[in-house]
Amino acid sequence: MGSKKADKSKKNKIPNKVYEAELFRLQTELVSLQEWVKSTGARIVVIFEGRDAAGKGGTIKRITEYLSPRICRVAALPAPTDREKGQWYYQRYVAHLPAPGEIVLLDRSWYNRAGVEKVMGFCTPEEHTRFLRQTPIFEQMLIDDGILLRKYWFSVSDDEQLRRFRARMNDPVRQWKLSPMDLESVYRWEDYSRAKDEMMVHTDTAMSPWMVVESDIKKHARLNMISHLLSTINYTDVARPTVTLPKHPIETGNYHRPPRSLSKYVPDHVGALLGGDH
């Protein structure tokens, strides 16, 4: 069933030219959102969760491509240290929440406890139950304080996930993305599915809903997710100051560039490459 659905959907894949044009339009809107956030002091938190290899990272890259890292930053926390394991569970995530005028994209979040920690036994049943009870309260506190919280679950079929894992095995720049923990998600697919279903029952609330992003086709997932995010925030265009540039660099005649021999330059690697073609 899953593979047939994936094959059918891929037949209607968006043409590259249409994808590139719409992506750039959405990225332009993201810049407008950024300027609004900066001007108004808004605080935005976007949670990215879902299966391994579901396309979360690629979507985050497209969101941040033209944004200022001073305003929009990504938080991808590693496994907790021994000290952090003894803290209030949400404590290390609270440290990454945005100040006024900031956007934080959480590449994985406190929902680790509902997924990998639950399935792999990294937390106790009592800790998991407490998490499901406390998380809606915790998120309500964030929202009450004025934070705009958005939660996205990237859904990928088991066949497509396995195909992406196989592609990573032979890709020298993406092999680092494939870990033994990722492989566990293949062997424990049903366990992760049950954990996700239970998480949704307790944390998909009216004030803080989960939005599911179908991501068997990565380009569709990126456009759909970014478009939806923009549609949920009532931002407006912010007037930017007019900048006038001179026709030529202004020279007073009082500055003289030091001789090139006094500076150390990186070798001309590109020149060597071009020279090898002739």
Image (cartoon, rainbow, N blue to C red):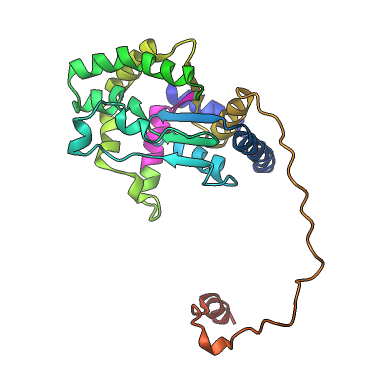
Residue in view at x 25 percent, y 15 percent: 130
Residue in view at x 37 percent, y 18 percent: 138
Closer to the camera, 60 or 186?
Answer: 60
Closer to the camera, 122 or 264?
Answer: 264
Asked whether residue 169 appears in the rendered view, the answer is: no
Among the 4 quarters of the image, the one containing residue 67: top right
Where does the C terminus fall, quadrant-wise? bottom right
Residue 120 in picture, x, y percent from top left:
21, 28
**Residue 38 position (above or below residue 149):** below
Using residue 214 as the reference point, say whether residue 172 is left or right of it: left
Residue in view at x 36 percent, y 43 percent: 166
163 inside magenta stretch: yes
Q: What is the magenta range?
A: 150-165
Residue 170 in picture, x, y percent from top left:
37, 51
Asked whether residue 61 appears in the rendered view, the answer is: yes
**Residue 62 position (above or below residue 4):** below
Residue 261 in picture, x, y percent from top left:
54, 89
